Amino acid sequence: MLQVSKRIKKTERQKQSANLTDYEQTYRSFSWKDAEKDLAKEASYILNAAHIAVDRHAQTFRKNKIALYYEGENGEKEKYTFLELSELSSKFANTLHTIGIDKGERVFIFLPRIPELYIAFLGILKIGAIAGTLFSAFQEKALIDRLSNSQTKIIVTDAKLFPRVSHILKDLPHLKKVILVERGAKNVPKHPKLLYYSKIMEKISSECKVRQMKKDDPSFILYTSGTTGKPKGVIHRHLAIVQEHVTAKWVLDLKEDDIYWCTADPGWVTGIAYGILGSWSNGVAAVVFGGRFDPSTWYKIIQDYKVTIWYTAPTAIRMLMAASDVSKKYDLSNLRHLCSVGEPLNPEAVVWGQKVLGLPFHDTWWQTELGAICIANYPCMDIKPGSMGKPVPGVTAAIVDDKGNELGHHKEGNLALRPTFPSLMKSIWRRPNKYKSYFVNGWYMSGDRAFRDKDGYYWFIGRADDVIKTSGERVGPFEVESTLVEHPSVVEAGVIGKPDALRGEIIKAFIVLKSDVKPTDALKNELSLFVKKHLAGHANPREVEFIDKLPKTRSGKIMRRVLKAKELGLPIGDTSTLEEY
Ligand code: WTA
């Protein structure tokens, strides 16, 4: 089994400055019921994640505190206080109400990272509707799947993204309106379904009574990819904010004077749980940068906003490592705590943080389905570089076999959790059997393979299935395959994640071409672009290989495991179900 590398020891001062000085004690005394009661008291017993995250602060000393520092792609800057965010989101909530949107109906946001995304998200929650977010790299095929399955009533988008929406309007019979955020667009589109954000927000009241929700009432839906079939709608409930709040406090270590930057897009779960809900519920000032990754720009954001807490992802860290010298040009001295999520954080990256930024990265582990951090290196713990850390108080984890029997230390198995924490998904949208399939013998099975060492630290090994993580973004091979087979030259496609030093994995597609089509390099390029154009910018296969035949089971299922083993030069394993190949 894996070697346990040296620890990064925390000093007494570091341990004491963390919110959790004696975590062993906290483990013993912690209960979600108490955490829930504490938060309910703080929030005047109004259970609504938007109220807990933002509105309640608008009634306290935080009223005029900056909640959101926004910097756009082209350097444009804006600031919003908690009161402003509260009022603007109330206006948005009132708008939805006037359109006739009711509790439980789905409203989707398809926007880049601009303030309106955050305002709309909070407004949707305030009236008890379900907020869906869509990463702005999604193209028509990805949009149709998500918007039609959820039967969305409203889409909030901008002038740049609207053309993708307009092409699929005919496929969305449940859609009532599209709200278009103009934000100074030169060519504002016209369409009978369109309402214009600036116009509706101008006239409407900024007072709204936030809807009191029940614990299990849904707050947001996020589509995520598995191995087979279309993406599934993971439903989270309002109560999840209890865990988002507590973990943002303990793991991210958010405190009153912090300036916090979560680099995740709200199209992914981290951008919601720790870019909107858990972070603001701790009353912290957050930075949102709307632009793309670039080492200098990122360091400049940290310098200019005096960022103290930074939550980011391994691919970005590795890209920064590759441009190490750039960091020297910036004053990064305000940073005091660094965290990472989304894919394996290699030990070198933890150590690099310590060496170059003066601070180690603290890895955290969780999933879309889990709604909040479940395993982490929290501030007071010694870090074992390469390990994901330990379960947070209130979360019981184990390594189990396929039948859900617990395995001992240093044994590889399935990483499983007892389903007894508040942020666990409530359901899978309209797929109850899919939801049930996550649970075995009283355990939630994560689909990740891992082991636990004798000190209780968890170490990630890999996925048990074919789900791909490329640059930290979760991609289902089936979605990519079904896009590829729509190309006129393609008969069949098999897609895998291929290990990559920078991006964790890259997408590789194996293609069977029609017999009369020539296998050229230009065609490889065309197929990659085809996925980019029709499915999503981040889902394009960076490698394409033409083959004569795909390995399949006798029942006709593509065996991606075989493609992967061959690609990596590994033994193919059990081939008893394999069709002649
Ligand atoms: C992977 C992201 C290793 C894992 C919040 C998981 C990780 C999937 C880590 C969920 C980590 C997440 N180390 N792997 N610290 N964190 N993963 O749904 O395979 O986008 O199952 O949620 O990312 O990805 P998702």
Image (spheres, helix red, strand yellow):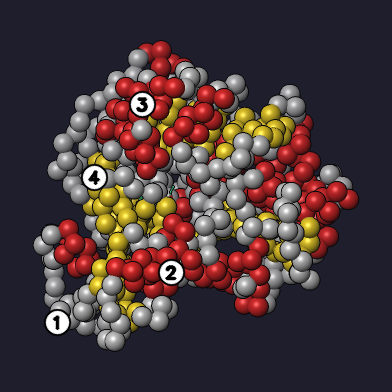
- The one nearer the camera, 247 or 525, is 525
Inter-mark Cα distance, 1 to 2 = 31 Å
Q: Amino acid at mark 1?
A: Glu
Choose mark 2 or mark 4, whichever is in front.
2
- Specify the label residue 580 is tagged with: 1
The answer as to whether callout 4 falls within 8 Å of ligand 1 is no
Q: Is residue 242 left or right of residue 559?
A: right
For disc 2, the marked residue is 530
- Specify the label residue 451 is tagged with: 4
Q: Amino acid at mark 2?
A: Phe
Residue 516 pos. (x, y %): 29, 87
Q: Amino acid at mark 4?
A: Phe
Which comes before the other along the chain, label 1 or label 2?
2
- Judging from the image, what secondary structure is the residue with disc 4 in? strand
Inter-mark Cα distance, 4 to 1 = 35 Å
Residue at the limit of the structure toward the left, as seen here: 571
Residues packed near mark 4 inside 10 Å, few (<14), some (14 to 19) or many (20 plus): many
Choose mark 4 or mark 1, whichever is in front.
1
State which quarter of the image contains the N terminus: top left
> Is the residue under label 3 in contact with that under label 2 (CB below 8 Å)?
no
Residue 32 pos. (x, y %): 51, 40
Inter-mark Cα distance, 3 to 1 = 53 Å
Q: Is residue 55 left or right of residue 314?
A: right
The image shows residue 118, relative to residue 486, as above or below, that is above
Q: Is residue 167 left or right of residue 525?
A: right
The answer as to whether callout 1 falls within 8 Å of ligand 1 is no
Which comes before the other along the chain, label 3 or label 1?
3
- Judging from the image, what secondary structure is the residue with disc 3 in? helix
Residues packed near mark 3 inside 10 Å, few (<14), some (14 to 19) or many (20 plus): few
Which comes before the other along the chain, label 4 or label 3?
3
Inter-mark Cα distance, 2 to 4 = 39 Å
What residue sits 20% from the left and 49% below the top?
412
